[in-house]
Image (spheres, helix red, strand yellow):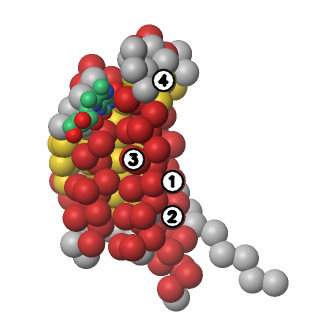
Amino acid sequence: MKVVEGDLLAGPGRYAIVVARFNDLVTRRLLEGALDTLRRHGGDLEQVTVAWVPGSFELPLAADRLARSGKYVAVICLGAVIQGQTTHHEYINHQVAAGLQRAALESRIPVTFGVLTCGTMEQALDRAGGKAGNKAQEAALAAIEMASLLSRLDD
Ligand code: DLZ
């Protein structure tokens, strides 16, 4: 039996982070969490590119561009969609999730989903370094593990 797994060492490859400015009280904290995770897992922050987009809806296009550039081993996407008084958030959530998945499949590098989908600002802050941790860490760890796994699958 041959088992292939990725490790959690960021290694020498470059990472890109795309982060939405909408609800930046939350997304700045997500960005801190992602950068901290990359650093703690051996990544070189000098080699990280951070691209800001207006809102989560714009994450897929920027992620796709970065992923196809050939410069990065993975792209980490961060945003905070908070339920308002309309169903706007539902459209954004579905489009963003599908768009990021498509960017990953078409570019053939990991594009990870660090977008909070919450009912209230309080819930979002809880998940951006508050009492429920920082969900951007999971997105950064998934990027590291998938980049490692894909390089081993190619060997
Ligand atoms: C318009 C909008 C709304 C209502 N809510 C959010 C949100 O909760 N989180 C977020 O990241 N972006 C939101 N946006 C902005 C859209 O993502 C997008 O930037 C605009 O519709 C322009 O395309």
Mark 3 Cβ inside 8 Å of ligand 1: yes
Location of the N terminus (image quadrant): bottom right
The x, y position of residue 31, in whole percent, is: 30, 36
Provide residue 49's location: percent of width, then percent of height.
20, 54
* Distance CA(mark 3)–CA(mark 1): 18 Å
Identify the image quadrant of residue 129.
top left
Of tags 4 and 1, which is closer to the observer? 4
For marks 3 and 1 on the same chain, the one whose residue lies earlier in the sequence: 3
Mark 4: amino acid: Cys
Question: In the figure, 38 relative to 6: above or below?
Answer: above
Position of 144 relative to 96 (above/below): below
Q: Earlier in the sequence, mark 4 or mark 3?
A: 3
Q: Residues within 10 Å of mark 1 (few under 14, many from 20)?
A: many
Q: Earlier in the sequence, mark 4 or mark 1?
A: 4
Disc 4 is placed on an element classified as strand
Q: Which mark is residue 142?
A: 1
To which residue does mark 4 refer? 118
Give the quarter the ligand 1 occupies: top left
Residue found 30% across the figure and 42% down from its top: 57
Query: Which residue was labeled with disc 2?
Result: 146
Of badges 4 and 2, the one in the foreground is: 4
Q: What residue type is disc 3 on?
A: Val
Does dot 1 land on a helix, a strand or a loop? helix
